[in-house]
Amino acid sequence: MTSIINRLERIIEPINKFAFHIACFLVFCLMVLTFSDVTGRYIIRPVTGTYELTGIFLSLIVFLSLGYTQIQKGHISIGILVEKFPPRIQAIIDVVTYIVVLFTLVLMTQQTFIYAQRSVNNVTGELGIPVYLFIIIGGIGILLFALAILLDLIKAIQKAVSNNYDT
């Protein structure tokens, strides 16, 4: 089981880290775009499509960062009650939680790609950029998040069935 986890970590973590770096680059682009728009208002004219691109970039930043945040355990969790339980019960609760979250993310991924197919003819209002491209990228971000949850699920199962609770 440990070898499977190690193999999955070597695949899932670099992909999520790459998506996170894309999100970081988009934050930089958003910063440059906002700066250019604000200064352009006073010098020449504002940047066309800033409002559209800001919304698109922000959604992509969120979706592409979810998986890496999960790997880094950066999501908020409240364990006031769960911390009082024995380690095996905590691991079982983690397994149940990860199964529910994984099921939800699989449905979200599926529906996101279906929505992208239905949005093939939709474009943004000002710049005329096809919307489905960004929906697909968002779906990929949800899929990467699901892979990170799958990895945590496997780790939680290993912890629940083993006698070693330090992992």
Image (tube, rainbow, N blue to C red):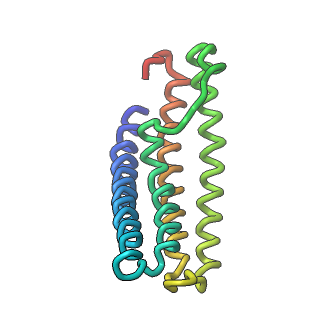
Note whether 81 is above or below 144 in the view shown.
above
Residue 18, position in %: x, y? 34, 55
Query: Residue at the location (34% across, 55% down)?
Result: 21
Q: How many marks?
A: 0
Residue 42 falls in which quadrant of the image? bottom left
Q: Is residue 81 left or right of residue 167?
A: right
Query: Residue at the location (63% across, 20% down)?
Result: 80
Residue closer to the observer: 36 or 4: 36
Residue 153, position in %: x, y? 54, 37
Residue closer to the observer: 144 or 30: 30
Q: Is residue 68 left or right of residue 145?
A: left
Note whether 123 is above or below 163 in the view shown.
below
Residue 47, position in %: x, y? 41, 78
Note whether 89 is above or below 27 in the view shown.
above
| Quadrant placement of the N terminus | top left
Residue closer to the observer: 136 or 147: 136
Q: Is residue 54 left or right of residue 44?
A: right
Note whether 2 is above or below 55 in the view shown.
above
Which residue ends up furthest to the front in the rendered image? 42
Query: Residue at the location (46% across, 65% down)?
Result: 57
Query: Residue at the location (65% across, 50% down)?
Result: 104
